[in-house]
Every structure is written in structure tokens, then in C-alpha cells.
Amino acid sequence: MKTKFPIAACIAAAALVLPAGPAVAGSSDQPTPRTRAEGLATPLSLAVDAEESILVTQNFAGLLSRVHDDGTTTTLYQGKEGWDVGGVEMRHGTTYFVESIGAGVGIPENLQGHLKSIDEDGDVRTIADLARYERKHNPDGDQHYGFSDDVSDKCLEGWPEFPPARYKGTVDSHPYGVAVKGGKAYVADAGANAILEVDLESGDISTLAVLPPRPVKIQAETLVPVDMEGNTMPVPECVVGERYAFEFVPTDVEFGPDGRLYVTSLPGGPEDPSLGARGAVFRVDPWDGDVHLWADDILTPTGLAIADNGDIYVASLFGGNILKLSCWGDHRSEFVTVNQPAAVEFQAGHLFATVDALSGAPAGPGAAPPAEQFNGKVVRIHVD
């Protein structure tokens, strides 16, 4: 059974109606984004090197593209039809990325996903089979989601089939973000709810960390989705006041100046604004896998970038802005207002971002509308 909403499908899905998170301080003197490329299809991941060479994934179209100075793009890699390409990262002339296709109607055998690389000669190498690892190990298989056993089975007879009333982590993999350091790749897998560590030479995979579920108190006015078409029903009265543990879904992953990994995470379930700001940034120790909640109350955080001084910029996809969080996490502000920001990268005093990321988006990987409908962009923003 599918237990999470994919990012694009959640636009149409109904959301649990919960209070919004706290407001953040804004500025009337915001920087002006400069467009570097446009007409992109679901540009959800981005990489920029020291020479400001830009690579962008057009995820649902299955493309990894290079952005040229004149705004045109060329295809560096094209995946199989129906596959998702994402998580691009550049290191020492080598490009790393992930591609995947989901388990389809909950059939684990249909799950496919790999970490790949492209060298300077254009040769493509498959480094690791992420889907096989998920089928064998299912890192969050012991995690309990939904309601606890304190809620009676009789009460839950009135709960819809989806989302499940309670369940353990299922076999699912959707590699989304990649960070590379010291001969290792760290993959944020939005299906496995885990950060995976991959040896770049051998391709061996291990689970570094599994993100914890974060329960939400069900309120009387809560509406629960019953399908992916936007239909809802009121929650049964007996669950009001109880807590429902959603899956926390890792998206982007980056190394900070302190040597720790910082991970953006969606809160599971529908992600539109009516759900409230429940996304977060976690800090993960790459040596022992210790997970620490670093910042929360963020709406749909799908990407993050870390400046040289440790300040963190977070793309709030449905919040319509990019947030700036101080290096200590004790202050946040709105850095810039933009539509549907998905990916952010910091390079040499500038922030690069993808915006209008779901403009013209298909319902999912492989379901592409005509190219002229796409209007995703890569922009460059000066950071003071």
C-alpha cells in the first residue's frame, strides 16, 4: 500500500486541516532573482561548481541537463521512460545523480533505483543499486506510523483505508538528494525515510540514519484525505486529541562547515499549505548516525544550501519563499519571495535556485505534458 503522497500529486490531494506554523520576519528590500534558464520540466535538483557551471535535473522528464551562459540547455543524461532523475552533485569533474522508478501499486519487485556517475568523458557508471538494498533491508521497517495501540480497533473502524490507521515502514525507495564527501555518497531517500551511505568505489550501501516519525495531534475540525483526488471525510470523533505519527520524508542533504549533514524533510502526508508548517531540518552525525532536530515549523522544505559562514537557506516549495536560518538556528527570516522554489545551492556569494518548479508539472514521472507547458526556471540571487 502506498502510504505517502508524491510531491506533485499532493497539489491535488486534500490535506489535514491544521493550524499554520509561526510567521517569519520578512524584508521589503529583497534581492532580485536573475533568470539563468527557463522552460524546464520539474527542476527539483541543482548543482553549481566553483566556475558557476550549472547542472539541473528535470526530474519527471528523466533528464539531467547542463545550463549554458546563454540560457540554453543540453542533455547530459536521459533516463528510461517513466523514470525519475534527481539528486545531482558535482565533485572533482565527476557528476553524481540518482534515478528511480516507484514500486507501482505496492509491488516491491517493480521498485528500481540507482546511484550513478558521469565522468568528464561522458561515461556513465552505475555505482549502487538502492532499490535492491531497500527490498533487502527496509531501513524503517521497524518504525511504527499512524496511531498508537492506545487507540482502540473499534474506534479505528471509521478511519479510511488511506492513510492507514497504523502500520510499519513499507518497502519503498525514492532517492531524492545526494551529498558527496571523502569517497562516500550520502543519499536522502524520500521513500525509505533514511539517509544511506554509499562507498563510491565498492558500491556498498549502509543505513546511516532513519528519520523519526513526528506525531500530530488530531483536532476536531480535521479532515482526512480518502484518495488522491482531493476527497475528504471528517475524522471519527474518537480520535480527536489522539496523535497520528506521519512518516518524515528526507529530501535534500548537504554538509555543513561543522562536518555534519543537514537534511530537509517533509512531514509526510499531503504537503499543501492547509496542512500547516510541519517540515523540518535535521542534523545528522556522519560518524555515528545520531539525528538531531535542528529547525522545524517549515512548510514543504525540499532543498537547502549552506553558506560558508554556516547560514542555511531553505526552499519552501508551497510557502512561496526561500528562508534564511542563522548558523545557530536561532533566527530565521524570509530571504526572498519566489514561486515554488524547489532546489537551492550556494556558490561564491550567490544563491542559485530552481523556481516555478511544478509549473506545468505532470502527475508524476513519465507522465509528461507538452514541453511548451513547462515553465520551471533556474535563477541566480546575490547574497550580501
Image (cartoon, rainbow, N blue to C red):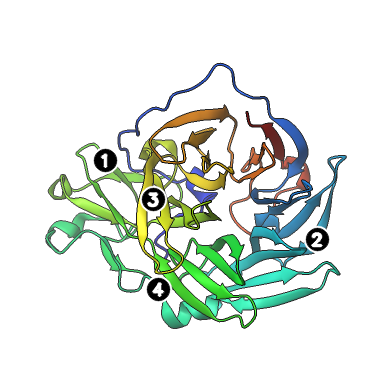
Q: Position of residue 317 (x, y in %)?
A: 53, 40
Q: Is residue 152 above or below residue 54?
A: below
Which residue is denoted by mark 1 in the rendering? 222
Closer to the chain start, of discs 4 and 1, is 4
Q: Amino acid at mark 4?
A: Pro
Secondary element at tag 1? loop
In the rendered view, tell whether residue 342 sits above or below residue 177: above
Residue closer to the observer: 372 or 66: 66
- SS for tag 4? loop
Tell me the tag on residue 139.
4
Q: Which label lies toward us, 3 or 1? A: 3
Report the residue marked by disc 3. Answer: 267
Spatial separation of the CA atoms under disc 4 and disc 1: 31 Å
**Secondary structure category for the residue under label 3:** loop
Identify the residue position indicated by label 2 in the image: 76
Label 2 with label 1: CB-CB less than 8 Å: no
- Residue 128 vs 377, above or below: the answer is below
Mark 3 to mark 1 CA distance (whole Å): 16 Å
Q: Residues within 10 Å of mark 3 (few under 14, many from 20)?
A: many
| Distance between mark 4 and mark 2 Cα atoms | 32 Å
The three-letter code of the residue at mark 3 reads Pro
In the picture, the quarter occupied by the N terminus is: bottom left
